[in-house]
Amino acid sequence: MKKLYYIAIMVIVGLSFSTAFGGYIFQEKSTTEMTTPMGTNLSTDYSTIYIDKGKIKSINSSDSSGVILRIDKGMLYFVDYAKKTYQEAPVSEIKAMTKSIMGGDSPRMKEAMKDLPKEQQDMMKDMMAKMFSPMSVSKTKETKSILGHKCDKYSISRNGKEVMEIWAAEDLGMGDEYLQFLEMISPGENNMFSEFNKIKGMTMESEMVMDIIGGMKSKNNTVMTDVKETKINPDEFEIPSGFKKEKSDLSKMLKH
């Protein structure tokens, strides 16, 4: 959930909220099933998300790592609350890195592919292009109740294949924070997530399936377990006093 692509997905599936009602704190359970030729591995993460106007913070309870997004400052912070350290990066730098990864031009991609035959290099670049290709969102007629809220189901497709489903509660409203974030990080003029402005309300549950190279497949289910509307102390979105700033290393940061 901490890689750049998944951070973007997290914003889509978890942060469609209305800032008109003040801040929100919610609990989230995320289960990932990774299938490889060697078998299947299941992992579960629990996160606490703080949301307020122009500010988002996510803390993973399993390893005390956190991500603070300051849309108002155009900055993203990766915080290790256990080690009391943090790194920071302008969103513009992350956008540039995403663009280079998409084009297969990043140093890491070049290093990983340098010894591969041209056919395999082309296959890798094609896979990256498909991973970041535009999505299509359509609202279905299905509904269900989650935490007492009526949720509408949305189907998200890429290249004609459904890759995600989202259940959103329209009565909780919809803000523009997640759209602002996606606009900030999406490379080029074509926002690969522009279709998501069709989703009305807070996303209460989502399921995403990704095909990975080598026959591997990832399936992630994320569901809200608690939602609370409340006034949030502005200090929640600041780096705690005494935390040591580490040199920014985007490639290292995006591994976490």
Image (spheres, rainbow, N blue to C red):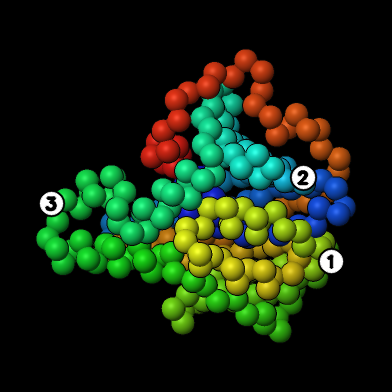
Amino acid type at image mark 2: Asp
Structural distance between the alpha carbons of marks 1 and 3: 53 Å
Residue tagged 3:
115
Q: Is residue 115 above or below residue 126?
A: above
Say which mark, if any, is on residue 187: none
23 displayed left or right of 210: right
Give the SS element for disc 2.
Answer: strand
Instruction: Decide if residue 194 is in sight here.
Output: yes
Q: Nearer the viewer, mark 2 or mark 1?
A: 2
158 vs 220, nearest the viewer = 158
Residue 51, position in %: x, y? Answer: 74, 45
Residue 180, position in %: x, y? Answer: 65, 55
Amino acid type at image mark 3: Asp
Structural distance between the alpha carbons of marks 2 and 1: 18 Å
Which residue sits furthest bottom?
Answer: 141
Say which mark, if any, is on residue 52: 2
Amino acid type at image mark 1: Asp
Give the SS element for disc 1.
Answer: helix
Are the residues flagged by discs 2 and 3 in contact, CB closer than 8 Å?
A: no
Q: Kindly identify the residue that appears in the image at 54 percent across and 44 percent down.
A: 91
Say which mark, if any, is on residue 171: 1
Structural distance between the alpha carbons of marks 2 and 3: 47 Å
Are the residues flagged by discs 1 and 3 in contact, CB closer than 8 Å?
A: no
Circle 1: is it few (<14), some (14-19), or many (20+) Cα within 10 Å? some
Q: Kindly identify the residue that appears in the image at 53 percent across and 39 percent down.
A: 90
Q: Is residue 56 above or below residue 103?
A: above
Q: Kindly identify the residue that appears in the image at 80 percent across and 57 percent down.
A: 18
Q: Nearer the viewer, mark 1 or mark 3?
A: 3
Of the residues under marks 2 and 3, which one precedes in the sequence? 2
